[in-house]
C-alpha cells in the first residue's frame, strides 16, 4: 500500500503575486489584474507582501501545537459546539459520501468583539471556546484572526477591481464576518493506510475565500483542470490563497474553486493556520450585480444559508 500519488509542483502552475501595492496604495490595478488572471485559472495563488508579522504567525503556531499536544481532557473541555467553535477530533469530518474520515484534528474559532462577545445572529456562530492550555491561546489566536482577515479584505478589494467593479463591492456587509479560523493538525500518516486515506480528503472549500499559512512540511495537493494531482509545496514568506465555492458562485463560475487535499507523507506532524473568509451571514450572494445575467448561474442565496447546507453534509457532529 502507498500514499495517493501526485506530480511534482510546476512553478508556473500557481502564480506568486505580491499584494503589497494593493495594501500600501501603489498600483492596485496591476495586482488586481494578476489576481483576476489566477482566479479565472486554477484558482490558487501564492501571495507575498501580505503584511502578517512573523511574530504573529509564530505565536499562533506555538499556541496551536501546545493545544494539540495537551492532555486529552483539556481538548475534550472545548469539544466542538453546535455553533462550530472548539476542538474537532480526528475523524470528525468526511469530505465526500463514502470517503474515509479525515485524519486531521482542528481547533476552530471566529469573530469576537473587543470584549470577547460574539453576535447571536446565526447557528454557525457562537461563543469562542478557549482552552485552559495553553493560557495564551485567545490572545495569539485573535491576533492572527485579525491579521489574516485584513489580508482577506485586501484580496476582496483586488478581486472587485479585477472584475471592473468598485473596490468595496464584496465588503459592504463584512463588519461582523461569519469567517472561521482553524488550526489544522495532521498527524504522521502511515503509508499502509492506503491511497484512499487523507489528512483531509479531496474537496473544494465551502465559503468565499481561504487564506492558508502552511508550515515547511508540505502535503497540500491541488487538482488541475486535466484531473491530475500536483503538489503545492510551501514557499517561504508566502501565504497560499484559493477561491472557495461561494466566490465562484458569486461570480457565476468566472472564478474557479478547485479541488484539493492533504497527504502528510513526511513522517512527522503538520500544522496549517487557516482563515475561511466569509462576510456577514445575511450577505446576499447574487451574481447578477457582479457579472450580469449569465445563463446557468445559481440563484441568489445568503452566505449563512449556504454554509448551513454545506456543513450539514460534511461534519459528523451535525448529523445527530
Image (spheres, helix red, strand yellow):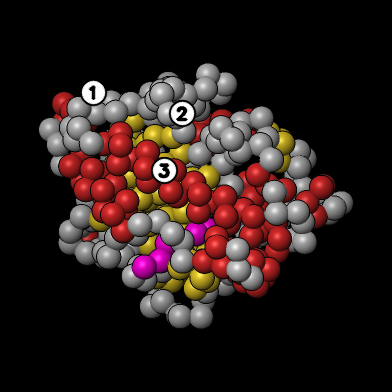
Q: Tell me which label, 1 or 2, sits earlier in the chain.
A: 1
- Label for residue 216? none
Q: Is residue 200 magenta?
A: no
Which residue is label 3 attached to?
145
Task: Locate residue 67 relative to residue 177 in the image: left or right.
Answer: left
Give the image quarter of residue 164. bottom right
Vertical placement of residue 171 versus 53, above or below: above
- CA gap, disc 3 and disc 2: 12 Å
Q: Position of residue 91 (x, y in %)?
A: 31, 39
Question: Secondary structure of the magenta portion, mostly?
Answer: strand
Q: Earlier in the sequence, mark 3 or mark 2?
A: 2
Q: Is residue 39 above or below residue 88?
A: below
Q: In the rendered image, which quarter contains the N terminus? A: bottom left
Residue sitting at x 33%, y 63%: 219
Q: Residues within 10 Å of mark 3 (few under 14, many from 20)?
A: many
Residue labelled with disc 1: 77
Q: Quadrant of the C terminus?
A: top left
Asked whether 57 or 92 is in front, the reply is 57
Does the residue at mark 1 contact the one at mark 3 (Cβ under 8 Å)?
no
Q: Which residues are magenta?
A: 237-242
N-terminal label among 1 and 3: 1
Residue located at (76% from left, 38% from top): 300
**Tags 3 and 2 touching, CB below 8 Å:** no
Q: Seen in the image, is 287 located left or right of residue 152?
A: right
Q: Residue at x 34, y 70 (%)?
A: 236
The CA span between labels 1 and 3 is 22 Å
The CA span between labels 1 and 2 is 23 Å
Residue 186 seen anywhere in this rendered image of the structure:
no
Kindly identify which residue carries mark 2. 113
Q: Whole-percent x and y of residue 269?
A: 20, 55
Amino acid at each position: 500500500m502507498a500514499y495517493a500519488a501526485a506530480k511534482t509542483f510546476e512553478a508556473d502552475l500557481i502564480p506568486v503575486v505580491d499584494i503589497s501595492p494593493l495594501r500600501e496604495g501603489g498600483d492596485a490595478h496591476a495586482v488586481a489584474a494578476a489576481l483576476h488572471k489566477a482566479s479565472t485559472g486554477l484558482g490558487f495563488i501564492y501571495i507575498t507582501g501580505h503584511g502578517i508579522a512573523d511574530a504573529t504567525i509564530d505565536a499562533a503556531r506555538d499556541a496551536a501545537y501546545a493545544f494539540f499536544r495537551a492532555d486529552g481532557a483539556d481538548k475534550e473541555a472545548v469539544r466542538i459546539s453546535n455553533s462550530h467553535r472548539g476542538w474537532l477530533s480526528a475523524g470528525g469530518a468526511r469530505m465526500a459520501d463514502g470517503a474515509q474520515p479525515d485524519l486531521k484534528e482542528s481547533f476552530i474559532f471566529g469573530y469576537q468583539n473587543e470584549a470577547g462577545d460574539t453576535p447571536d445572529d446565526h447557528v454557525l456562530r457562537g461563543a469562542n471556546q478557549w482552552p485552559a492550555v495553553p493560557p495564551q491561546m485567545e490572545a495569539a489566536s485573535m491576533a492572527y484572526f485579525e491579521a489574516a482577515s485584513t489580508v482577506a479584505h485586501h484580496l476582496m478589494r483586488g478581486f472587485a477591481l479585477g472584475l471592473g467593479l468598485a473596490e468595496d463591492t464584496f465588503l459592504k456587509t463584512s463588519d461582523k464576518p461569519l469567517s472561521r479560523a482553524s488550526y489544522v493538525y495532521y498527524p504522521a500518516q502511515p503509508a499502509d493506510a492506503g491511497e484512499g486515506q487523507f489528512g483531509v480528503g479531496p474537496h473544494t472549500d465551502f465559503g468565499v475565500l481561504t487564506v492558508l499559512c502552511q508550515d515547511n512540511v508540505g502535503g497540500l495537493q491541488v487538482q488541475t483542470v486535466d484531473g491530475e494531482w500536483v503538489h503545492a509545496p510551501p514557499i517561504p514568506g508566502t501565504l497560499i490563497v484559493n477561491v472557495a465555492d461561494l466566490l465562484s458562485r458569486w461570480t457565476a463560475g468566472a472564478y474557479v474553486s478547485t479541488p484539493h487535499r492533504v497527504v502528510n507523507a513526511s513522517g512527522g506532524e503538520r500544522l496549517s493556520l487557516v482563515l475561511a473568509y466569509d462576510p456577514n451571514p445575511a450577505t446576499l450572494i447574487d451574481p447578477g450585480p457582479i457579472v450580469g445575467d449569465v445563463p446557468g448561474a445559481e440563484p441568489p442565496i445568503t452566505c449563512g444559508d449556504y454554509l448551513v447546507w454545506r456543513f450539514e453534509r460534511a461534519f459528523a457532529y451535525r448529523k445527530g
